[in-house]
Amino acid sequence: MDELLEILNDLNPDIDYQNEKNLIDGKCLDSLTILTLITEICDTFDISIGPKWMKNENFNSVEAMWKMIQTIQEEE
């Protein structure tokens, strides 16, 4: 999870990712940042995030993102 937090902090260090639970719904991350985030996650964790994973709830918190990453890794 440390790698994920590093990616997020590189994108926007002003957000408290460990406590924020509404990154998407609360508009903490804009669409351009989300696209960059997805690319960074795919590259770092060597996964593909397909359309079925493109849901707000998968990106609303660091925990949700981590769970998604782990699930994708298990499936691939």
Image (cartoon, rainbow, N blue to C red):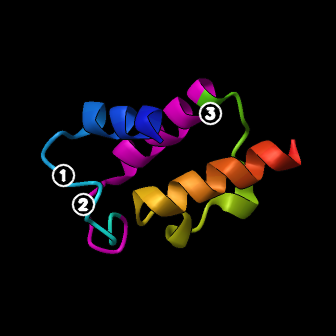
Badge 1 marks a residue whose secondary structure is loop
Task: Identify residue type, mark 1.
Answer: Ile
Compare marks 2 and 1 and give the one earlier in the sequence: 1
Q: Mark 2 points at which residue?
A: 28
> Which secondary structure lies at badge 3?
helix
Cα–Cα gap, marks 3 and 1: 21 Å
Q: Residue at x 62, y 33 (%)?
A: 42
Q: Which residue position holds label 3?
A: 42
Callout 2 touching callout 1 (CB < 8 Å): yes
The kind of secondary structure the magenta stretch mainly shows is helix
Q: Is residue 74 above or below residue 23?
A: above
Residue farthest along the right direction in this orientation? 76
Query: In which image quadrant can residue 16 be found?
Result: bottom left
Looking at this view, name the residue that lies furthest to the front: 2
Residue type (three-letter) at the residue carrying disc 2: Cys
**Left or right: where does residue 33 sit relative to residue 19?**
right
Q: List x then y, in percent, for residue 64.
A: 52, 63
Q: Which of marks 2 and 1 is in front?
A: 1
Residue shown at the point (42%, 48%) measured from the top left: 34
Check contact, mark 2 vs mark 3: CB within 8 A. Answer: no
12 sits to left or right of 53: left
- Tell me the CA gap for discs 2 and 3: 21 Å
Q: Estimate how packed mark 2 is, as few (under 14), some (14 to 19) or many (20 or more) residues with alpha carbons within 10 Å.
A: some
Left or right: residue 14 compared with residue 17:
left
> The magenta stretch spans which residues?
24-44
23 versus 41 height, above or below? below
Which is more toward the observer, 60 or 29?
A: 60
